[in-house]
Image: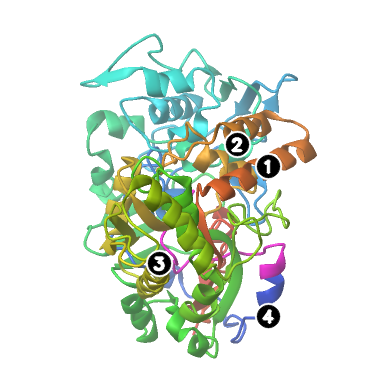
Amino acid sequence: MRLGARKTSLAALLTLAGSLAMLLSGCQTGPGPSSGGPLPDSQQIFKDQIGGIADIKTVDPAVNTDLYSAEVIEVLWPGLLVLDPKLAVVPWAAQAMPDVSSDGLTYTFKVKPGLKWSDGTPITSETFAYSINRAESPCTASPAAYYLYTLKDAVTFNTAETCTNGKISGKVQTLIGDSIQTPDAQTLVLTLEQPATYFLEAFTYPISYAVPEQLITQFPTDWTQHLTDNGGFGGNLYKLTLWNHAGKLTLDRNDAFWGQKPKLREIQITFYKDTTTAYNSYLSGKDDIGGAPTAQLAAAKTHKGFHQVGVQQIDYNAMNWKIAPFNDVRVRQAFEIALDKTSLANTVLHGAVQATNHIVPDGMPGYNPNLKGPDNTQNLSGNTQLANQLATAYATDTKCGTSSDFSKCPAVTFTIPSGSVDSQNEAAAEQQMWAKAFPGWKITISSIDFDTLLTNLNAKTVQFWAIAWIEDYPDPQDWLTTNLACDSAYNSGNACDPTADKLMHTADANPNLQERLTQYQQAEQILVTQVGWLPLDQATTWWEIRPWVVNFNVAAGGLTPLQTWQQIYIAKH
């Protein structure tokens, strides 16, 4: 999914198979949950926080691309399928897992009867058909439409047709009646362009969630701003009752929800522009959960209610292959090889992460322990001399400098999300390493709001940036094809290697598990060598929580599963 800054208060996981989990399995302190029984319903209020951003970007599941927005979207809008705490795909608004045709092209879902929005409007197969079609429509211009490109004619509909004043022109006017069919109010039939082994996993992404046609029809351009009207609106566990865009968002239990109602009556979320302020708010007793900046991690480990776990999140830098100097592979390799990733992880980030050259993280199917970095070694400590040699070859060919003076080479702006001291410190350390390897090269750091960075990445106008990718579902397709296929909407750096691209797309449809994992590994090695990403580390995350918050946890994708939200409650204290 999910794009994020280096660290979020809730970006943790329940379990992770792999070395990181083993390393940190004992890093939990504090007593067990309060045993006095739950507080009265009127006091079942969880004071949540998100640090490092002033507000979430959207609550529209059709356009969501980031973790912070997804934290709210997941509990507001119903999906037919979701991931459970162990990252297994399970039915939610669907009665059961879909029937799949023998050729792997047709998926038939049965929607649970009796579903309805908080305003009483029924939720049927037509609701999901409308929502999926809207997500792929060129009029919606979703940056996440790529997740459902497996649907027959979806690529043509989304990319080849045009939308003018809400009217679609072109051969494919709609997917409804084409790849999306609703024989009756409880049946949804989806037809794929070609078999996709990962389709059900990808279908758990929010872009497939139901949205309210009645509200969108009434307020077509700003419907999400009317969700708090008339006591709030929602279709899942919760409804949105407050969103002031000034640091506060409130979710209240949706009494129209069809399944087991959550024990928490209300979730109050406070946004903080920087992570230090967020943590101080927790320490002062204002919030029920918080996460320390890495500089305070050692002290935080001694606190009651501290938890630290490995997480399937890769923190990385990325370069735009169409913007000089990163249109030359030698420069991309030089900028990576110049970095001492081990020092960044252990010194700058206080050992809170594990340095890596990988795109596919440890613990993910298809993880390749034999992968080599762009210098054709598994070294993580950098090589200043080799980095300088690569950059010098570029400077000589383009006549922009020498081995001791790169001042006339194209200026580099390194963009990082604002709000995190850790990101600022790491970027400054990287800048020093590049200055040592490339004397005189003008490399400046630009710190901008996270939402603005996402907007610019969608436009593919950023030259060089730092960000994180957090697992959507446990398949290497989510890391490779989704991000680095030549035609991927998430490919903000215009990275494109034809050989890797063919391998990824072949693996996407390959029903043979071992063959497809090998194909993904081959593609990853090419993309690491070509520096499709500049991976820095695989993250861990940590949080502190009050002992009276019972059953709280999150899964590997950085989100608290719906099944877990149903069980969380506030105990007497």
Q: Return the mark for residue 26.
A: 4
Alpha carbon distance from label 3 to label 2: 28 Å
Residue 192 shown left or right of residue 467 in the figure? right
First in sequence: mark 2 vs mark 1: 2
Pick whichever, 262 or 544, lies toward us.
Answer: 544
Name the disc covering residue 434, or none.
Answer: 3
Mark 3 vs 4: CB contact within 8 A: no
Which residue is at 49% across, 59% downward? 389
Decide whether residue 19 is among the magenta residues: yes
Q: Is residue 547 above or below residue 257?
A: below
Q: Please, what is the dominant secondary structure of the magenta stretch?
A: loop
Distance from the alpha carbon under mark 2 to that under mark 1: 7 Å
Q: In which image quadrant can residue 277 be found?
A: bottom left
> In this view of the protein, which residue sits in the foreground, 230 or 340?
340
Mark 2, residue position: 500
- Measured Cα–Cα span from mark 2 to mark 4: 39 Å
Region in magenta: 1-20
Disc 4 secondary structure class: loop
Q: Amino acid at mark 3?
A: Trp
